[in-house]
Amino acid sequence: MMKKTLKKMLVLALAVVMCCGSSISAVAAEKEEGLPENGRYLEMAGDESEDLEEGIQPREPAPGLSSITITRLLIDENNKVLIEVEIMGTAKSVLCWCNNTQCTQDFNRITSITSGNKVIGSRRYFKTNISRAEVESGIVLNMRAQATNAVSPWNTLTTSWTVSLPQ
């Protein structure tokens, strides 16, 4: 019983130290009196000042979701149709459907929209199962996209676009 209590106390003490303790970084010291030749002293990480270059500005908070638009259709290297969705602000989740089938997001093609050094939105691309041949033979695409705000998850924006191809 004594061992269990001792273990619980040690676990609690470690948890308190990990949660409440300060972050410490080791910095190589110049040879000082009282330190061994390869000695080190500890300095609090918060004591270090961050040197910013002239062209680099501190990060700003990401803006909340303000709009979503289906901007265009593309053909990828596999001759499949991609839907480009432009999101202004920060979205937690983005979904897209084409002819009532949910499309898969291509995470390798995401691009950021910037204003100066601040990211204000993104362009996301969604894969459809529609081939270039179907597009060239003429097809109607009913597309819908939705994005949920990362900051306010109750704020979901939607957009839709219907297009008859080829145009």
Image (cartoon, helix red, strand yellow):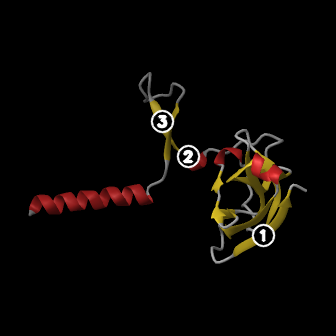
Mark 2 near mark 1, Cβ–Cβ under 8 Å? no
Dot 3: element: strand
Q: Earlier in the sequence, mark 1 or mark 3?
A: 3
Separation of marks 1 and 3 at Cα, in angstroms = 61 Å
Amino acid bearing label 1? Ser
Picture coordinates of residue 19, whole percent (x, y): 42, 59
Q: Position of residue 107 (x, y in %)?
A: 65, 48
Name the mark nearer the viewer: 1 or 3.
Answer: 1
The residue where tag 3 is placed is 41
**Viewer-side label of 2, 1:** 1
Q: Give the side of residue 12 with respect to residue 7, left or right.
A: right
Name the quarter where the N terminus is drawn. bottom left
Residue at label 2? 45
Q: Residue furthest front?
A: 137
Tell me what residue is drawn at x 72 percent, y 52 percent: 125
Closer to the eye: label 2 or 3: 2
Q: Image point 72% across, 61% down: which residue?
A: 61
Evaluate whether residue 89 shows in this view: yes
Query: Mark 2 belongs to which amino acid?
Result: Ala
Task: Report which residue position mark 1 lands on.
Answer: 160
Report the residue that reaches farthest toward the right.
Answer: 167
The residue under the point 74% across, 72% down is: 158
Q: CA distance from mark 2 to mark 3?
A: 12 Å
Q: Residues within 10 Å of mark 3 (few under 14, many from 20)?
A: few
Secondary structure under tag 1 reads strand
